[in-house]
Structures are given as C-alpha cells and as structure tokens.
Image (cartoon, helix red, strand yellow):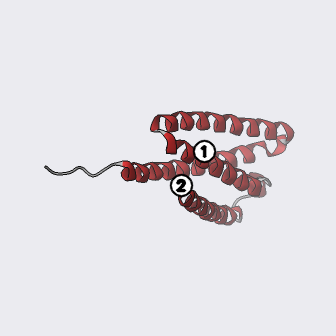
Amino acid sequence: MKAGFIKFAKNTFFFSIILAIICFTISFFLPAKYLTPSLPYLFIFFFVVTLFVHYILMKASEKRMSRFVNYFMLATFLKLMLYIMILVIYVLFNRCDAIPFILTFFILYLFFTVFEIISILSFLKRANMQTQKPKCKN
C-alpha cells in the first residue's frame, strides 16, 4: 500500500504542477478582475485534501470491499461539506473576490475530482486483479 500511495502522491504532485502551469499561462490572457489572489492556496488545499482522502480510502480497501464503499461515500460527503464551508466562509469575508474564487474553486474541484476518481478506479482494478486467483483447468 505504501508504494501505491507514494506513486499516487507523485502523480498528484505532477498533475497539480501541470494545472498550475496551465492556470499561470491563462492568467496572462484574462483580465485581473477574473483572477483570484487565492489561487496558489487553492492548489495546496486540493492537493492536501486529495492525498488525505486517497490515503483513507486505500487503508479502507485493505479490509473489505464493503468497508471501502462505506468509506468512499462518507469521504465524498465530508469533502463536499468541507468544500461548501470553505466557499461560504471565503465569500463572507471576501465579497469582492467571490465570483473569481467560486469559479476557480469549481474548476479545480472538477479537475481534482476526475483525477481522483480515475486514480481510485485504477487502484481498485489493480487490487482486484491481485486478489483474484487464477482458475485451474480440469
């Protein structure tokens, strides 16, 4: 499991760097009013949350698949609640940056969610292949 998590952490890091480069490039073409100053912090936030949730899910998958499903549902719910709280708190304290922040947050949420789901499916597929025993021909 440790090697799998380290591989995921590296992939997430490179994914975040590629997204940051794309965002940095796009920032040259967008007017300043569409850019949020919190963008670098959002990358760190999504990176940390994604790693944490993936670690928890990998630990849960070691036990039983039914446990993994429960953890996945709970983690998804708690992540959504955390994301909503972050959005609401930020918008309450920074009303002038609300629209750029929400749009940026939503776009990063989509990218990191797709990345995380693809990674989890890949991990589960590998784990499932390792637990299946080859059938003997009679």
In space, the residues marked 1 and 2 are separated at their CA atoms by 11 Å
Q: Quick one: SS at disc 1?
A: helix
Residue at 59% of width from left, 48% of height from top?
Answer: 54
Q: Is 78 located above or below residue 115 in the figure?
A: above
User: Looking at the picture, how far across and down is residue 63, in whole percent?
Assistant: 50, 41
Q: In which quadrant of the rendered view does residue 23 lie?
A: bottom right
Residue type, numbered disc 1: Ile
Can residue 108 be seen? no
Q: Pointer 1: residues within 10 angstroms few (<14), some, or many (20+)? A: some
Q: Pointer 2: residues within 10 angstroms few (<14), some, or many (20+)? A: few
Residue at 60% of width from left, 45% of height from top?
Answer: 56
Mark linked to residue 56: 1
User: Looking at the picture, how far across and down is residue 58, in whole percent?
Assistant: 55, 48
User: Looking at the picture, how far across and down is residue 8, in whole percent?
Assistant: 56, 58
Residue at 55% of width from left, 42% of height from top?
Answer: 60
Q: Taking 48 as reference, is 135 left or right?
A: left
Residue type, numbered disc 2: Met
Q: Quick one: SS at disc 2?
A: loop
- Residue marked by disc 2: 1
- Between 83 and 57, the one lying in front of the other is 57
